[in-house]
Every structure is written in structure tokens, then in C-alpha cells.
Amino acid sequence: MSTPPTPFRWAVLGPGGIARRFASQLSSSQDGVLVAVGSSSAERAKAFAEEFPLDGPALIGDYEQVLASDQVDAVYISTVHTGHARLAALALEAGKHVLCEKPLTPNSGTTMALIDLAARSGKVLLEAFMYRFHPQTVRVLELVAERTIGEITHVDASFSFDTGARSGRLFDPMTAGGGILDVGCYPMSFARFVAGAAQGRAAVEPATIAGSGTLGETGVDEWATAELTFPSGITASLRTGVRLADPQSATITGTRGVIRLDDPWGLGEETCIELDVVGEPARRIEIPAAHAYALEADALAGAARSGGEVPELTGENSWGQARALDQWREQIGLRYPFEADDADIPTLTGRPLAPGSVQAGPAMTYGSIPGVDKRVSRLVMGCDNQLNLAHASAMFDAYVEIGGTTFDTAYVYGGGHIEKLFGQWVRNRGVREDVVVITKGAHTPHCDPASITRQLEESLERQGTDYADLYMMHRDNPEVPVGEFVDAMDEHLRAGRIRAYGGSNWTPERVDEANAYAKANGRTGFTILSNHFGLAEALDVPWAGCVHATDAQSRAWLEERGIALLPWSSQARGFFTGRAHPEDRSDAELVRCYYSDENFERLARAEELGREHGVPATAIALAFVLHQKFPTFALFGPRSIAEMRSSTLGLGVELTEDQLAWLDLGSPAR
């Protein structure tokens, strides 16, 4: 006789209307039981517990009390959108699995941070799209995958209603109101699921999103539409709103027929799939009644017990959903006040930033640079891939929490927007004296001492600071006598606007000339250089005016001078990521700069050594850079926290001199 499974113990956080639907169906799950309810209102929590009697230990309290209980396995979060992230983070840190109502958070930056925390916690985080687990949706995606209506060409989906008034959370920008996040997420997710099923995947990201709509008098979207295209050629038309009643429906068109749903989201007692295939009688596929909220609870419980994610809705899937919703909102000009470029965005948990508090991989290593009285992390965060302040805050927080201290900014990145985002984050976190800021100017064609002064002053103003720890002249201009550059840099250094300086994309010969001038004239010279350097030898450079240091002569010069190098593109623009194959010549720049028999042999050796160390070839390439005889501080520009964590793997790789030589073809294959 088999032993019945141990009950899976649930708590509800936020006892509102949708929580009532969850609680009313939980008894239909395989083994889920409701044991606790948490709320900011004691009266609401008590009323909810009276409506839905709790199993033991029958805990009623505030959020913190419920999360502190070891009698709770998982929480269902159903507060307003803006309350999701903090509660979910606190729950994960408390060792609870989390089922969080959609959207996980109001934007992709915060969603990315929450997903990363879930991965580090080892707990399941599931976005509560209950309709995805209903038999109707499951069967629809099976029909798509089976090509019952041929190749999918178009998806049409709508979820819109008229509230009849402009009041409450749906019309409050501070609670992320409007149609797109509240119900537009349903048709968006449906289109992504269908496009995924057509390719044998859980979901696919749209290649393009063209949105339009109406912002109401309170500033939220009251009606919005979107036209999507997917990489496969599938298109989609989406509609959503909170002040316009549009029939809730979904239609999938294929080359051989059509699938129609007249109840795709609410999923009442009677649902059916209308299926029309060319040359065949129309069919109605009746779907038995099911409890979708119970099914999603079972999906989370199953993943919790197996130690994995819910395959239908992984963290990566939810992050893709958040990015798509961000784009839709951006298309209609909707950014909430708490997302503004000058907003005081808190950390994910609301606690102060804790440098070095997260060890999700190898420990950060540090070095020093003359003139800079702070620890310089060996991995330097490039400030050029941040989309908005929410994304920048999540990326920069995660970097500092693994021990990163050093940020690379530039006058031209994002037309100056990136410097403003970075400066706002620094102010929000209060970390100016804890971080090393590299500021770059002298960009072609404005590469002269007068332009440097103008650009430096503007960069400092954008960042909201009065000095740069390091200033890099991003290009050289051989038509300007080198002494004029040295004089300008020395003046800024003496005035306290910079602490040290160097050049990016300067040749060794010009650096020697600059330092000779500095020595002869009582000036401070270069202490750092930032040229292209990495395991792959550069055959050419990506941009005009760039200089590489991958040749033997440049390396010897760096060793002899002892000048610190901040190498850019140490991963050879993706050459070591698996993108490069001799027969694949689709990326003309990659081919031009790195395709050679010697570099492919370096790649093969990095892959072989990576297998021995249990890391990807990119980690070996980074370790090669960090193990040079001259000081190196590798620049990297991750677009996600996951990319950042992957990049840090090279910090944990120790290479011998023989291995370094072998990687660089200095000895024959082993």
C-alpha cells in the first residue's frame, strides 16, 4: 500500500479577489493545503481565514510572521503589481517556494533580479499564468505542435474590458495600473506560447513589437494594441484595455486551417476548441471542467519536489515575457513614475546594498592602479548595455554584490544617457566613495585637448560627481602633439577632477612619447592603457581608430613597462562563445577580425582546457587575460545577470605558465 504524499503547505500573501479563486480551488489540487494567510491588514487576514478555514497550524499574521514560519512550504502572492518583487524576494530568502501573480514585477529589470535570486535560493519561482496549465491550453499547444492546421501564420488574441470608472489600482500609475500589465500579459504570453509550440519550444521571443494605444487622464494605458513578428515569420495581433470592452478571444491561423477559442482566459465550466481544417468537417473539441489554479499549484509542488523549474514557465520564459511587455509599454510612451530616469529605485529586497555579500561563483579578485586609492576589481563592468534605470539598477546591484567595484563609462555611450543612469544609481545607493569610475572622452572627431575638457565637465555633470577615478582618452589624434594631451590631463589631475589617466586605443609608441614628455616637464604620465587584448589574435579591429595589443611585440612592451591594461573585447566579440565555426561566415565582422587557422586552434585548445576545468571556453579565455605578466583588468559588458555570472567563472580558473603558452600556440598540441 503506497504512502500518501506529505501535504504541500501553502500560505496566501495578499487576501484579495484573485486569492479567493486560488484558495477556493486549492482543495482540488493533489496535496496542497492552505495553512496560513498574511496581510498588511489584520482584519482582512482574519476575514479571509474565516471564509477559507486553514489547516494546522492555522497561522494568521502579517507578511513577516507568515514567512518566518517553518510550517509553510510555499506562498501565493496576490498583492498589487508593485508589491510582488519585495514579497517574493523575502519569501525566497526565507526558504519558501513562490507562486506569484502575473506580472512577476512591473518591468524586466526587476524581474531579472528576482529570477536570479530564485536561482541562487534553490527554490521554485513560478509566474501565475493559471490558464497555461488548463487542459484547453495544453490541447491547443499540442494541436499547434502536431501541425493540425499546418504551419502557423498568425495569432489574434484579446483581453479587454470596461471597468466603467477611472478609480482603483488599475488607474493608479504608482501601482503599475493599466491594461498591458494587468490583462494584456495574457494575449502576449499566448502568442509567445503558440510561436514556441510551432518550433517545439516552450515559448519564443518576438523579433519586433509595434504598439499603439491610448493613455488615460491618470496616465495609464486604457486601450492598447500590438503587432508582433516572430523570427519564424509568425505574426500576432494583440488587444487589451480597461476602458473598452472587446470580446475575450484567441484565434490561431495556419496554412491548413484555424483554431478558435471563445474563452481562452477565464476558463469557466464549459470550454471548447473550435477546429476548422480545410476539406474536413468543423470540429468542436469539448474540454472537461478543470481547476486551473489547482493545476498551477500542482506544477509548482512537483517542481519543488524534483528540484527543478516548471518547464512550461521557466524563469527565462518569464523574463522574456517581461521584456516583451516593456517594449509594448515603451511603444505607447508608458513609463511609470517609479521607473523614471531620476527615480529612487530601491534594491530588490529594500535593504541597503551589501557589497561582496553574494558568492554565487568564484570570488572577485582585485588589483591596484597608481593614483587610485581604492581596490580595483579585476572584472570591470561596462556601462553601455543598460536599457533603463530599472535594468541598470539590477545589473549594477548584482555586480557590486559579487564584489565588483569598477565601472567603465564614456561620454558617447547612449548619447550620454548611460552616464545619467549610472549617476542616478550611484546617488540612490550612496556608493560614490566605494566605487571606481572610469570616464572616457576624446572621441573621434572631437579628439583634442579642448574637447576633452568640455566632455569631462559634461560627463561629471551627468554623473552628479566632481571627479573621475580614472580618465581615459578613448582615441588618439596623432595630428596633435602628445604634450598637449599630457598638459591637459595633468591640469585636470592637479585640479582634482581626475585621480589618474591613460589612453584607450593608443599605440605603445605614443604612450612612450607621452610619458617621456611628462617626465621631462614635471607632469604626471599615463598609468593605464585600454586596448583590444585577448587570447584570439586580432587580424583587424572592429572600429576605425582602434588599436589592439594581441601581437607579441605589444605584449612584450606591456611586460617591460608594467603599465596596467584594461583590455576590451577579451572574448573576441563572441569568438569563444560557440558562435564561431570555419564554415559559418554569416558574421562578417567576426570573420574579418578573428577567422584564422591559428585562432580556431586557440579556440579548440580553450574548449579542451575548459572541459578539464568544467567551465566554458569563455572562462578559459578570460583566465588567459587575467594571468598575464602585466596587470590586467578585463572589461566586460553583460546584458543580463546570468551573463554576468557566467563571465565570472574565469575568476576561478588557475592556469600554469605551460598552459598559458599552450593556449597561445607556444607549444604543440598535447
Image: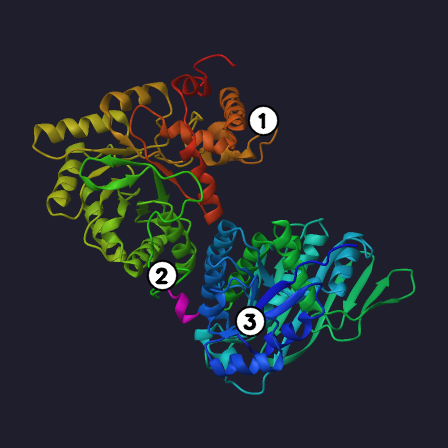
Q: Position of residue 567 (x, y in %)?
A: 35, 33
- Disc 2: which residue: 351
Name the residue at 25% across, 53% down. 432
Residue sticking out furthest to the bottom: 164
Given residues 230 and 351, the one toward you in this image is: 351
Q: Is residue 146 above or below residue 663?
A: below
Query: What's under tag 3, amino acid-wise?
Result: Ala
Indicate which disc, 2 or 1, sits on the residue closer to the N terminus.
Answer: 2
Q: Secondary structure at mark 1?
A: loop
Are discs 2 and 1 less than 8 Å apart at CB?
no
- Mark 1 is on which residue type? Pro
Q: Which residue is mark 3?
A: 36
Q: CA distance from mark 2 to mark 1?
A: 49 Å
Mark nearest the camera among 2 and 1 is 2
Tell me what residue is drawn at x 30 percent, y 58 percent: 429
Which residue appears at 38% of the width and 56% of the height?
393
Q: How is the image coloured?
A: rainbow
Which residue has dot 1 on it? 582
First in residue order: circle 2 vs circle 3: 3
> In the displayed structure, does residue 391 sit left or right of residue 55?
left
Task: Report the amino acid beneath label 2.
Answer: Arg
Q: In terms of secondary structure, where does tag 3 sit?
A: strand
Residue at disc 2, secondary structure: loop
Q: What stretch of residues is rendered in magenta? A: 336-341
Task: Name the residue rendered at 46%, 69% in the picture.
Answer: 65
Residue 667 shown in magenta:
no
Q: Residue 324 appears at what percent x and percent y? A: 56, 59
Can residue 476 be seen in this snapshot? no
Report, in whole angstroms, how far the alpha carbon at label 2 lies from the one at label 3. Answer: 26 Å
Mark 3 or mark 1, which is nearer to you?
3
